[in-house]
Image (cartoon, grey):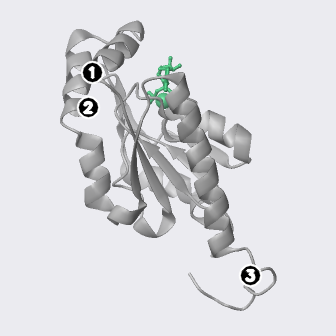
Amino acid sequence: MRTNPNIIITGTPGVGKTTHAETLAEKTGLRHISVNQIVKDKECHEGWDDEYMSWIVDEDKLLDALEEENVKAGGCIIDWHGCEMFPESWVDLVVVLRVDSSTLYDRLSSRKYPEAKLQENLDSEIMEVLLQEARDSYDEQIVVELTSNTTDEMESNVDRIESWIKQWKQDHVADGEGEGDGDGGQ
Ligand code: ADP
Ligand code: MG
């Protein structure tokens, strides 16, 4: 039984996952889990792919590392450009961030992405690849699509997710204080 929800923030590279996750962690006290950082620090990979500019992730190792971090206990904001690998039972909300192509182009160009990689990510955003992955992997009720083109949008997204967290806590823990013991539930 979780006393705080787990939230995945996903989307194409450059949509604003890390910025959202850091801001939310600061405002709510929940833990920002940068999956990229864990992959790197705990070596959950088979090396670096130069062409794709990303780690070749070993998902078994990564899941073990997330178990070690006790992610399933709740209170985590999981920041990763994918969501299908996480066990459904760990996840309370999946936020898929979206941006306009021109905005994404500017953000990825300033990251000095190689042209092929940049184009691939733009295609992925246009084809809604990550949104589809979220919808295929989780109950539609817990998948939310939010736009992240401007800082105003980001602020309103953060407010919205904060309210959602409050509501989740009211629904799941509000009057359960001290009642959970011996429940034995998963
Ligand atoms: P991701 O983690 O999805 O790759 P980042 O959070 O690193 O994306 O954001 C990429 C860049 O875009 C950063 O420079 C960040 O400041 C900027 N950015 C992200 N979201 C927004 C937004 N909603 N409005 C304006 N700039 C944003
Ligand atoms: Mg990031």
Residue 176 circle label = 3
Q: Crowding near pointer 3: few (<14 within 10 Å), some, many (20+)?
A: few
Q: Label 2 belongs to which residue? A: 125
Q: Residue at x 50, y 63 (%)?
A: 92
Q: Quadrant of residue 126?
A: top left
Residue 102: x %, y % from top left: 29, 15
State which tag comes first along the sequence, 3 or 2: 2
Q: Residue furthest bottom?
A: 182
Q: Residue at x 71, y 47 (%)?
A: 28
Q: For numbered disc 1, what is the local secondary structure?
A: helix
Residue 2: x %, y % from top left: 64, 70
Q: Is the N terminus in the top left, top right, bottom left or bottom right quadrant?
A: bottom right
Q: For numbered disc 2, what is the local secondary structure?
A: helix
State which tag comes first along the sequence, 1 or 2: 1
Q: Label 1 belongs to which residue? A: 101
Q: Residue at x 68, y 69 (%)?
A: 170
Calculate the distance from the C-alpha at mark 1 to the C-alpha at mark 2: 7 Å
Q: Crowding near pointer 2: few (<14 within 10 Å), some, many (20+)?
A: many
Residue 75: x %, y % from top left: 65, 57
In this view, the residue in front, 30 or 33, is 30
Q: Quadrant of residue 52?
A: top left
Q: Residue at x 24, y 49 (%)?
A: 132
In this view, the residue in front, 48 or 2, is 2
In this view, the residue in front, 151 or 79, is 151
| Amino acid type of the residue tagged 3 in the rendering | Gly
| Amino acid type of the residue tagged 1 in the rendering | Ser
Calculate the distance from the C-alpha at mark 3 to the C-alpha at mark 1: 46 Å
